[in-house]
Image (cartoon, rainbow, N blue to C red):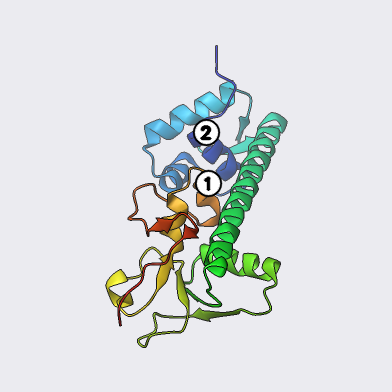
Amino acid sequence: MVKEVLDEREFELVNIVGAELGSNQRDLSRRMDLSLGMVNMLIRRLIAKGCIRIEQLNKRKVKYILTPKGFAEKMRKSVKYTLKTINSISLIKDRLKELLFSLYRNGTRNFYIIGKHDLSMLVEMVIKDIHWNDCSFKILDETPRDKVDGILLICNEHVNEEALVIHNYVHLIHELARDSHAIQVTGCGLSFEKNYKATCESDEGIEPVKKAG
């Protein structure tokens, strides 16, 4: 009996066929970075599940077409993934708001965001939701060489912390990685690992890493 639920590779193949991006098995093999034998096996499984069918164009050429069932499965899984991504982004925004309020309660009023990353966009969205009139927020293209009057919010995992020796900062990716609800969201560019070095935390909330200048 063929298992009806599509696995990730089968779903990937359904998406490619649905977008008409592969005209033959060799094309599909290149796009999926799989051997021809593996692609052939996936096609046979999807045919058995009723998700795709083969149309014979001539003696040497065939076309792979999504069936109504295949299209429905593609839409069902796409919607499920989208909802999961939205839910994960909502959790991350809530945690960012907690971090910013913790810094605010500790007296921080000037915030500098570093790193062109999907996370920096979420930080901006959270800041707009908060509406703090007594605070300033500035986006920086690179780490400032001179000490700033405020906190650097690091939104890029590739920022060299050795270059931050004169600044107080919070590495937001490190902080989010410490939380059990910081779910990976690879579809929108975010991916928080569990083994980052963490900044220090007090009973009052997040305490920025303080560097002597």
Query: Could you tell me which secondary element the residue under label 2 belongs to?
Result: helix
The answer to whether residue 2 of the structure is visible from this angle is yes
**Sequence-first disc among 2 and 1:** 2
* Residue 81 in picture, x, y percent from top left: 61, 42
Above or below 133: residue 74: above
Q: Amino acid at mark 1?
A: Gly
Along the line of sight, the residue nearer the viewer: 114 or 102: 102
Which label sits in the foreground, 2 or 1? 2
Tell me which corner region of the image, top left, top right, bottom left or bottom right, holds residue 164: bottom left
Dot 1 crowding, Cα within 10 Å, few <14, some 14–19, many 20+: some
* Residue 155 in picture, x, y percent from top left: 46, 66
Query: Could you tell me which secondary element the residue under label 1 belongs to?
Result: loop
Tell me which corner region of the image, top left, top right, bottom left or bottom right, holds residue 158: bottom left
Q: Residue at x 53, y 45 (%)?
A: 23
Q: Residue furthest top?
A: 1
In the figure, is residue 186 to the left or right of 94? left
Q: Residue at x 31, y 70 (%)?
A: 161
Q: Residue at x 44, y 44 (%)?
A: 32
* Residue 117 in picture, x, y percent from top left: 49, 66
Q: Residue at x 70, y 72 (%)?
A: 131
Along the line of sight, the residue nearer the viewer: 3 or 165: 165
Q: Residue furthest bottom?
A: 146
Q: Residue furthest front?
A: 203
Dot 2 crowding, Cα within 10 Å, few <14, some 14–19, many 20+: some
Q: Which residue is mark 1?
A: 22
Along the line of sight, the residue nearer the viewer: 144 or 43: 144
Above or below 173: residue 47: above
Above or below 33: residue 202: below
Q: Which residue is mark 2?
A: 10
Separation of disc 2 and disc 1 at Cα? Answer: 14 Å
Q: Quadrant of the N terminus?
A: top right
The answer to whether residue 61 of the structure is visible from this angle is no
